[in-house]
Image (spheres, rainbow, N blue to C red):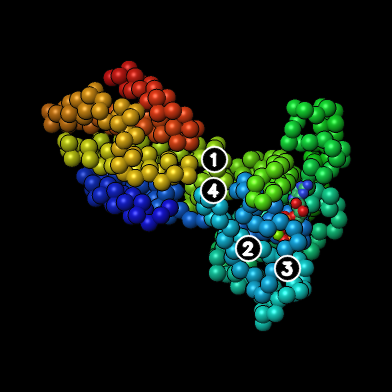
Amino acid sequence: MNSPLQTQISEVLQKLEALLDRLPEKVAKEVRQEIREFRQLLVETRSPRFALVGRRGSGKSSLINAIFGRKVAEVGHEKAQTGAATWWPYAGEYGTIEMLDTRGLQEGSRPDEADSAASPIESINAALKAKAPDIILFLIKATEADSGINADLEALKEISQTVEKVHNYQPPLLVVATHCDTLEPKNVRLHKPDEEDPDDLKEKRDRVTAIENLLRAKIESDPYLKEHLITVIGVSSYQSWKNDTLRSDERWRIDELLHYIFNELPKEGKLAFARLSQARTLQESIANRLTQVVAAICGGIAAVPIPIGDIIPITSLQITLIIAIAYVAGRQLSSQSAKEFLTAIGATISAGLVLREIARASVKILFPGVGSAVSAGIATTATLGIGKAAIAHFIQKTSLQNARRIFEGERKTINNEK
Ligand SMILES: Nc1nc2c(ncn2[C@@H]2O[C@H](COP(=O)(O)OP(=O)(O)OP(=O)(O)O)[C@@H](O)[C@H]2O)c(=O)[nH]1
Ligand SMILES: [Mg+2]
């Protein structure tokens, strides 16, 4: 996330933390935890990092393109890595992935053009020491799964152990069988299942499953790798471009792979991944989490037994939530636009809401305990409604009108609760 936004959000969070001393310790502790998660997801967000293990032509560059859904890496006939292996950023329109190509390890020799003093293995180790990969991805052509892969497995182990030793972090391992579309029957399109003969389709899918099982058995024969293995998944990464225009998209099960990756990423990498992959379900998942976290924080703040003073941080938090959700979807909103969104869905001009805020403040003065509980409920539900409306509009790309209806639906819940 760019720095003005980060600064803005950090400031809101700091103001909030200053307020927490006035909360009962138990509530304060919970809110502090939510703030911590919000920080990790949003402020400390960074590019995800993957170590790629895979022979030449196994489809490493294609997989990177498949994740982005656009051409960010050159496919095929790329020169062997020149010089030292380094973390390499691949940037799409909505974010960057850092990749470490570890090809030198399992080939055990210098690539043709390497003329640096360091051997590939030394330079890979140096890169692994500089930064830990979040996940190790092992790619192998589905058609080569039954060939000798001992050298590959040794490379996997060496990488994993180096990371564990240096960073005290055990990177999860995802095994990807690429080129599944090329399995027999060749002309059956896995990515167009509805248009294929069910029996033929089944035959092809069974082959994929058999290859996955074979690979899993090989990996699991090594206790160390077994412990780190998340899953084995067969995919097709095939896309074809003509002058940077996508002319055919034969990706299969990349969505599923994206989910596995997303689940294994640390909190700091999730938002960037959901954004750059433009995978809507991942964006929804992180936006829902952000909404829950902010709603819980708002509820906590509203429970502070002081009147009116809390309305300001609650509104800025809700604005922050809208900006964050739009950001996840790939947009940069100003505070002004976020406020306009609040107005458009009826969350600020809503007289009811304003009146309730005032009523809430008075109740607090008269009956502090009761008022706090009621206002905490209202703040939580209103924030959930704002989050849902923002998800509908910015991620699911539905109209403002629809977003407004969704928010109003939540408000009815508020009224029913009262
Ligand atoms: N049919 C099919 N072709 C694929 C798939 N993945 C990659 N390819 C093709 O395989 C060839 C090699 O793919 P790359 O992505 O360049 O492989 P790489 O691992 O980056 O290769 P190096 O950079 O040389 O190590 C290209 O012609 C790709 O189009 C796949 O899932 N299905
Ligand atoms: Mg490549």
The Cα–Cα distance between marks 1 and 4, rounded to whole angstroms, is 11 Å
Reading the chain from its start, which is encountered first: label 1 or label 2?
A: 2
Reading the chain from its start, which is encountered first: label 2 or label 4?
A: 2
Residue at x 40% of width, y 28% of height: 400
The Cα–Cα distance between marks 1 and 3, rounded to whole angstroms, is 34 Å
Q: Contact, CB < 8 Å: mark 2 with mark 4?
A: no
The Cα–Cα distance between marks 2 and 4, rounded to whole angstroms, is 18 Å
Q: Which residue is mark 1?
A: 282
Mark 3 is surrounded, within 10 Å at the Cα level, by few (under 14), some (14 to 19) or many (20 or more) other residues, namely some
**Circle nearer the viewer, 3 or 2:** 3
Mark 1 is surrounded, within 10 Å at the Cα level, by few (under 14), some (14 to 19) or many (20 or more) other residues, namely many
Secondary structure at numbered mark 4: helix
**Circle nearer the viewer, 1 or 4:** 4
Reading the chain from its start, which is encountered first: label 3 or label 2?
A: 3
What's under tag 4, amino acid-wise?
Answer: Leu
Q: Which mark is residue 100?
A: 2
Q: Is residue 365 above or below residue 122?
A: above
**Circle nearer the viewer, 2 or 4:** 4
The Cα–Cα distance between marks 3 and 4, rounded to whole angstroms, is 27 Å
Q: Which mark is residue 80?
A: 3
- Rendering quarter of residue 44: bottom left
Q: Which residue is mark 4?
A: 276
What's under tag 2, amino acid-wise?
Answer: Leu
Query: Quick check: 137 left or right of 342?
Result: right
* Front residue (pair 103, 219): 103
